[in-house]
Amino acid sequence: MAKLKRELGLLSTTIFGIAVIVGAGIYSLIGVATAMAGPGVWLSFIIAALVAALTALSFAELSSMFTGAGSSYLYVFKGMRSRLFGFITGWLILFETVVGVAAISMAFGGYFASLIPIPIMAAALGIILLLSIVNLIGIKESASLNNILFVMELGGLIFIIIAGLLFGQANPNFFDFQIVPVLSGAALVFFAMLGFEMIASESEEAKDASHTIPYAILLSIGICAVLYAMFAVASLMLVGPEILGVSTAPVKDIVFPILGEYSFIFSIIALASTASTILICLITASRLSYGMAKEKTLPHFLSAVNSKFRTPHLAVIAALLVSIAFLLIADMVIIAEVTNFAALAAFFFINISAIMLRIREPGAKRHFRMPFAIANIPVPAVLGAITSLFLIAFLSKEAMMYGSGLVVLGAAVHLLMPKK
């Protein structure tokens, strides 16, 4: 059987990693994260990045064991020898994606309302409906458009960093913070780090994957952590935590001291970034549920394909309805935290699976092996599992309630589904 060409070096793989991490999260959450953590919001981003790096190493090792599978369900099923926990992990990652649509659509609504005075919820609902239609029709995203959007997103971050460091006059005390609000902020801004798990999927196409993938993971997350922390510092220097913490269009307000009436340009950049991410999430959620239905782990009707558009129309509609249901919570912080609960809970199972496979199958072939093990137990996976649960503890009670409900619902769906 033909194999993929291994032609991605460290630079290419690292750029890929930065591209999948940098996105709408930072444009969506910088304001509400500042309201939580105050001048210490920069530290929240660093803590979130450290947790992400630990779990990313587990993804790298597991993907190198099960090359081409690309399935969190399979990782956990193999590691924990439990179809139930495997299903719950896949279920949580599915909901991480679809609930994320609701959170990002509210950010889209805030930026849209800063340009055209309509209710934020109306704009959020409108973009979900519009992009669900695009998803249903099956219009493919242009790779060139994605590259342009990435350059806009990254360029916007760098512009604000330079402007804040050179011209910022707010002069906040960056060490005037309390650790609990900073940790709560980290639990929220973990949302901005999601996407790192995709780096491990490049293991089949990377040169010397055992070295390229782990270094690319750490470099990508490290670079994004520095960018995000510097972005937070620069933003505070431009407008201060008092203004930033209450803004519904934070990036526009951040650049207003520099660009004045032209600050609307950054609202347009934020709109493009959030809309692109929403579409990617809707496509991913519908294809995940379609794939799970084909494997008979979700109801079979979700695997139906429209004869005209050749898209999984019922899965598309399901993603639309669930996104709208979570949008009705009408609180972007809670919605983003539910997304993080789903991701962090899934990552806990991923880390435990990496540990269990090291214990049971120490000699199994791994293109990449996590560094730092004690008695063959990988320390990064242990720390990844602990810190995932630790961050969950700093989510709001409402987020934990909704997140726990997702776990219970997932278990019920699995137990009620006919067994293959």
Image (tube, rainbow, N blue to C red):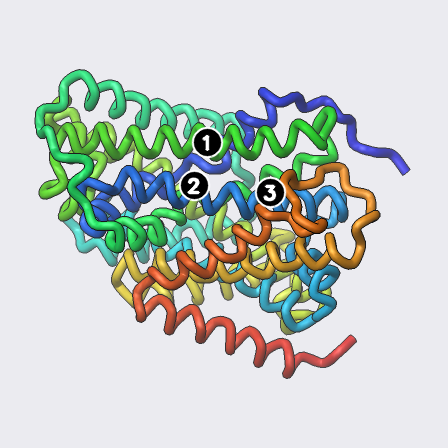
- Choose top left, top right, bottom left or bottom right for residue 298: bottom right
Residue 113 appears in the picture as rendered: no
- Give the mark nearest the N terminus, 3 or 2: 2
Q: Residues at badges 2 and 1 in contact (C-beta under 8 Å)?
A: yes
Residue at (37% x, 37% y) in the render? 273
> Residue 156, relative to residue 72: is it above or below?
above
How far apart marks 2 and 1 lie (CA) works out to: 7 Å
Which residue corresponds to mark 2?
A: 49
Q: Is residue 121 left or right of residue 345?
A: left
SS type, badge 2: helix
How far apart marks 3 and 2 lie (CA) works out to: 12 Å
Q: Which mark is residue 57?
A: 3
The residue closer to the viewer here, 175 or 116, is 175
SS type, badge 1: helix
Q: Position of residue 323 (x, y in %)?
A: 41, 62
- Give the mark nearest the N terminus, 2 or 1: 2
| Label 2 environment density (alpha carbons within 10 Å; few <14, some 14–19, many ≥20) | many
Q: Residues at badges 3 and 2 in contact (C-beta under 8 Å)?
A: no
Query: Label 1 is placed on what type of residue?
Result: Gly
The residue closer to the viewer here, 95 or 192, is 192
Q: Position of residue 309 (x, y in %)?
A: 60, 52
State the residue lying farthest toward the top: 166
Query: Label 2 is placed on what type of residue?
Result: Ala
Query: Label 3 is placed on what type of residue?
Result: Leu
| Image quadrant containing the N terminus | top right
SS type, badge 3: helix
Residue at (18% x, 55% y) in the render? 119
Q: Residues at badges 1 and 3 in contact (C-beta under 8 Å)?
A: no
Residue at (10% x, 29% y) in the render? 171
- Give the mark nearest the N terminus, 1 or 3: 3
Q: Position of residue 120 (x, y in %)?
A: 21, 53
Residue at (55% x, 73% y) in the render? 410
